[in-house]
Image: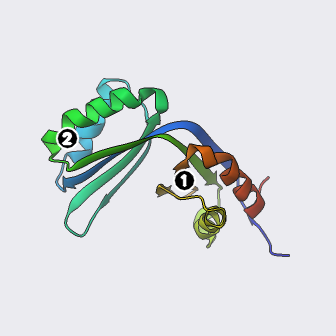
Amino acid sequence: MVDKILIGGILQNSHLARVSVMGVPDRPGTAAAIFRAFAETAICVVYIVQCIDQNNYDHIVLCVDRDDLEVTLRLACEVQAELCATTISFDPYVASLSIFGPDFRERTGIAGAMFAALANLGINIQSISTSISTVTVIIASDRLADAVKAVEDTFELP
């Protein structure tokens, strides 16, 4: 029997929409312009990932409550020209799944075990975010129940 890695628990949200602002020339103020617009409209962004590609273009992925998607897309399109973003895409039916625990920074293999469990069920990860104590993935909302079961089978829960 393989020892399961102990985690602190699972967090999930099945009522999200993903918006991706892609191909923004990398420069100071990009994230400020996007998220200032959301704050001024009281849109709560619950997930953010940003990366810079080899051509120095920013790609920002964010998630909001599904009910806020229409306003979020309008705001993203309003800042698209200002930021010179090449593409804005979205998926109205995503979910977040997070595992957390106090000792993640001291344990190896946690992220890999989670990703393998999802891959074994054919669950595609759309985005990944980590912190010292959390690993979060964005997946299709219709696969959330399967993903939760996979995580429960893979890790030891309190």
Farthest residue, direction right: 1
The disc label shown at residue 51, or none: none
* Residue 101 image point, x, y percent: 65, 56
Quarter of the image holding residue 4?
Answer: bottom right
Tell me the residue that label 1 is attached to.
136
Counting labels gives 2
Q: For the residue marked with disc 1, what is the amino acid?
A: Thr
Residue drawn at x 54%, y 59% is: 124
Spot occupied by residue 92 in the image (x, y as percentages of width and height): 46, 38
Q: Is residue 117 left or right of residue 50?
A: right
Task: Determine the secondary structure under disc 1.
Answer: strand
Q: Is residue 75 above or below residue 147?
A: above
Residue underneath mark 2 = 80
The amino acid type, in three-letter code, at marker 2 is Gln
Q: Residue furthest top?
A: 41
Instruction: For residue 77, say whether it is visible.
Output: yes
Res. 36 in view: no
Vertical placement of 130 versus 94: above or below? Answer: below
Q: Is residue 72 above or below residue 140?
A: above
Q: Looking at the image, do the residues carrying marks 2 and 1 touch, with CB atoms under 8 Å apart?
A: no
